[in-house]
Amino acid sequence: MDAVRVALLREVLAGTEWVQATRRFAGTLRGAVAPHGGGLLLVGSAAYEPWHLAAHLDDEAAWSGLPELSPTLVRHRVPGGAPPHLAVGLGRLAAAGRGETLLVVTPEQPGAGLLERVHDARRNGATVLALDGGDRDLHALAHDALAASPAVPDGGHEVPADLDLDTVQHLVSAAAGENSLPAPRGHRRFRDRLARLADGLTAPPPPRW
């Protein structure tokens, strides 16, 4: 999904909770990975690898001049011959600590093994964020969470389940790269943002993923 389609999707969703919710979560993400932070770690479940979000965040980091948004993708299984930026295994989570941000993205239950690693990372001082299907155990560990499916409120920020997780990821990554959140009636800012992103599509940075 390119920037123009994201903009059109936001127009379609105007009046729903999604635009505000994804921008709120993106704001939390940006604040957590401020330049003085220790980096962004992105991990999914054993069956779901969020490489697509990793690519979008990497693009947003380049286009917006916010290198701290470029994530390190942590993988459950690293295939032989993988390039260095795609060869980071779960052992990296053991070193996660203060100043670092761990973003867990999965539409399914993360699994006991991953939850234990996330718990250890939080205990060591890492900021934990979750973008998922509403898993209670994961949300209990997260400093902030956004669920793409219904869940009984448990301290997270659930919103109506009218979008799938992949679409929510596109909205979050696009919002994370915005230099400022537009005011409710800031149509000019919105058009300027759309024009800038559309221009960026004509000369994208070299793909890393």
Image: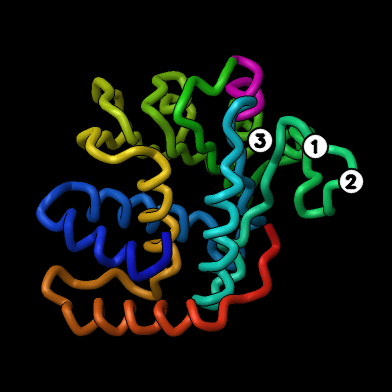
- Which range of residues does the magenta coloring cover? 112-118
Labels 1 and 3: the sequence-earlier one: 1
Q: Write down the quadrant of residue 159 in the picture.
A: top left
Q: Is residue 149 above or below residue 201?
A: above
Q: What element carries label 2?
A: loop
Q: Is residue 116 above or below residue 85?
A: above
The image position of residue 121, as x and y in percent, is 64, 34
Mark 1 vs mark 2: give the one in front. Answer: 2
- The amino acid at mark 3 is Asn
Query: At 44% from the left edge and 84% from the top edge, which residue is drawn?
Result: 199
Depth check: 77 or 37 in front? 77
Q: In this view, does 99 lie above or below 70?
A: above
Q: Looking at the image, which residue sits at the far right?
A: 81
Q: What element carries label 1?
A: loop
Residue denoted by label 2: 81
Tell me, for residue 78, which label it has, or none.
1
Mark 1 vs mark 3: give the one in front. Answer: 1
